Amino acid sequence: MGAAERGGRRRPACPACGLVYFASPAVGVAVIVEDERGRVLLGRRARGRHAGRWCIPCGYVEWGEDVRQAAVREFAEETGLVVELAEVAAVKSNFHDPERLTVGIWFRGRVRGGTLRPADGELTELRYVDPARPPQLAFPTDAEVLAELAARRTSGQ
């Protein structure tokens, strides 16, 4: 494997065919659902290195899948709830795992059906929490999103 200069960076390249490899982050989606008191639905992660920590229900966009459809699908898979998406609440680059860089899109959502339950084994527990006082979170960007929600709530926006 060789290397080539592209876009101001040295990148892996095939000397035989000239193919240059551009590493790209995966796209993750999350849905923010609030109850009538402004609390946000969080799930406790079931496995992996973040097991026992909490997150806004989330997942990956699959190849060929629309980001909004992915958000609705992932939310239903994890929570048992069907949501209708509203506006994008946040878009952030996730650098907390250098081996798995992602770009996250957090949508606001409204529950339209289903039964609240940890549905697919990714989460062990679901509950609504005050965004200003979350439990121990799995992802730093969820902490940023919750802090932004709490700040908007206290400023009356």
Image (tube, rainbow, N blue to C red):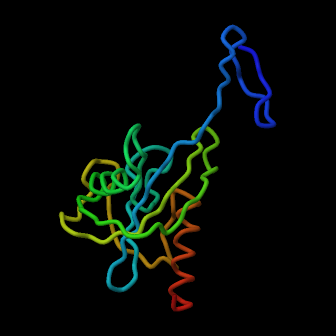
Residue 59 in the image: state x and y as whole percent. 41, 50
Which residue extends farthest bottom? 156
Q: How many marks?
A: 0
Is residue 92 shown left or right of residue 117? right
Residue drawn at x 22%, y 69% as measured from the top left: 112
Residue 93 in the image: state x and y as whole percent. 61, 54
Residue drawn at x 48%, y 76% as measured from the top left: 131
Residue 69 in the image: state x and y as whole percent. 33, 52
Which residue extends farthest top? 16
For the N terminus, the image quarter is top right
Is residue 93 shown left or right of residue 38? right
Return the residue nearer the eye: 157 or 120. 157
Residue drawn at x 52%, y 42% as measured from the top left: 26
Return the residue nearer the eye: 154 or 69. 69
Q: Is residue 152 above or below residue 49?
A: below
Return the residue nearer the eye: 34 or 7. 7
Is residue 103 shown left or right of residue 67? right
Q: Is residue 8 above or below residue 74?
A: above
Residue drawn at x 69%, y 15% as measured from the top left: 18
Which residue extends farthest left? 114
Q: Is residue 90 above or below residue 148?
A: above
Residue 142 in the image: state x and y as whole percent. 52, 63
Return the residue nearer the eye: 62 or 6. 6
